[in-house]
Amino acid sequence: MAQFKRVMSIVVKGLLALVLVMAALPAVTGNQYIYRAFRATYLKGHTTANIDDASAFDQRIVKAGTPQPWPVSPFYNQTPVPADLVAWHEQFGTAAWLVVHDGQVLQERYFAPYTAESRTNSFSVAKTVTTMLAGAAVADGYLLSFDEPVSDFIQEWVRNPRGGKATFAQFSAMSAGHNWTESYYLPLNPTAELYYGDQAEAQVLAAGFERDPGKEYEYNSAGTQVLAVALRRALQRKNPQLTLAQYLSEKFWAPLGMEHDAIWTVDRPDGMEKAFCCIYATARDYARLGQLLLQGGQWQGKQLLDAGFVARMSLPDLQPFYGHSLWMDHTYKHPFYLFQGHLGQYIIVVPKEQLVVVRLGQTRDKDRAGEMLPKEIYRYVDAAVEAARQAAAAAPVAVPVAAPTAAATPLTAG
């Protein structure tokens, strides 16, 4: 018995020593961000970042102005979401489903515990928003043009033979040649460090270049963060206190009449916005971003974003499926483009049908069409088009419904 106790004591001490070593390893290796990754994600049962993790990070508020509630279609929720699509939403953890047709909310459904008030993570939808801010900065004179080299503001790259030539447009189109490894499911990788770490600017500027800019497409989250570094420096060259969150409020969030403030997480309190990922907003407010592009950058008689810039964003660059921070399939029977984020955050614009479709959720079907766009996107496009056509067919006999108020209880699944 005494020998057994001695053996167990050695085993326990060994295990404790191993735990201490493992706990100290991130700090010793310079990977302290792993502590936050475990707190925010892995210890909560997730294998990757999730749509509800805003509280794990420092934040800036994107202030809304005077709310402009969405007009509601006379056929609001009178075109039912098909049962098989409801089951699909439930299977893949959809949080919100919203269809806007002709500038009016046609379908709206939320899946518990999410409601119309829920602000969830945009993930890479923020990339598109960052490109939109770059377009606004050109119009405001902060940038000479979208094709201006980022080295005009990133002096560290002026003498870099590749970095000195890379432009805002190339970073937006994922063709800048920036050296990066994109990965979402392992804690020890550059993308995880960018997401959970506190040195976003230093990390992406240190990555360097692996090819000449403008030659090849490669999806690269860090590239959008580089774009944001240069954009922030351009803004602060003229207005030292202006943050990206404030500029987003000024250019889009307030003028679009968003109904809620948004959250934009930052790498540290005195740091910068994580432009490659992390805006948290409601489904109805996300829809306004799509509606703005659908309307060529115009909102209530004001040109918030140059129409030519919107057109450039939504046309292919080096690949038929990607323009400037927008994904697309212009060859589909219902041509569309979209903002797309990790785990299936979508703002889909179907111009010929005057549709904006928002799907937010906890995960998505990974099956892809043409190896690039998830097949479920086509399912969502088809469902929205069918709903719009059903509403049009019912127009002569439909009975208008009252627009829901801000206090109305949102529809939920079940």
Image (tube, grey):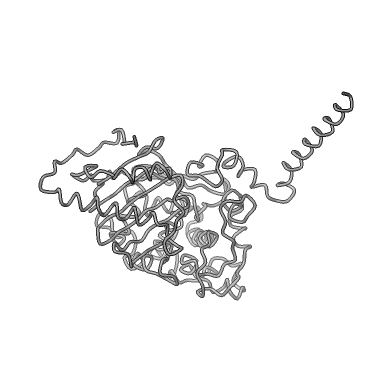
- Percent position of residue 388, x then y: 23, 52
Q: Of residues 246 and 346, which is closer to you in this image?
A: 346
Residue 272 appears left or right of 62: right
- Quarter of image, res 349: bottom left
Closest to the observer, 107 or 105: 107
Examine the rendered structure and indicate whether residue 408 appears above or below residue 158: above
Foreground pick, 274 / 397 = 397
Q: Position of residue 392 (x, y in %)?
A: 17, 52
Residue at 39% across, 35% down: 112
Q: Is residue 17 left or right of residue 226?
A: right
Percent coordinates x, y for residue 32 in the rendering: 67, 47
* Above or below: residue 204 compared with residue 149: above
Total number of numbered labels?
Answer: 0
- Classify 31 as above or below 318: above
Residue 61 lies left or right of residue 393; in this view the side is right
From the viewer's perspective, tell me whether residue 97 is left or right of residue 199: left
* Residue reaching furthest to the top: 1
* Image quarter (top left, top right, bottom left or bottom right) of the N terminus: top right
Residue visible at 31% across and 43% down in the picture = 83
| As drawn, 117 above or below 189 | above
- Residue 200 coordinates in the image, percent (x, y): 58, 55
Query: In which quadrant is the C terminus drawn?
Result: top left
Q: Residue at x 46, y 49 (%)?
A: 279
Direction right: furthest residue? 3
Q: Which residue ends up furthest to the left in the rendered image? A: 396
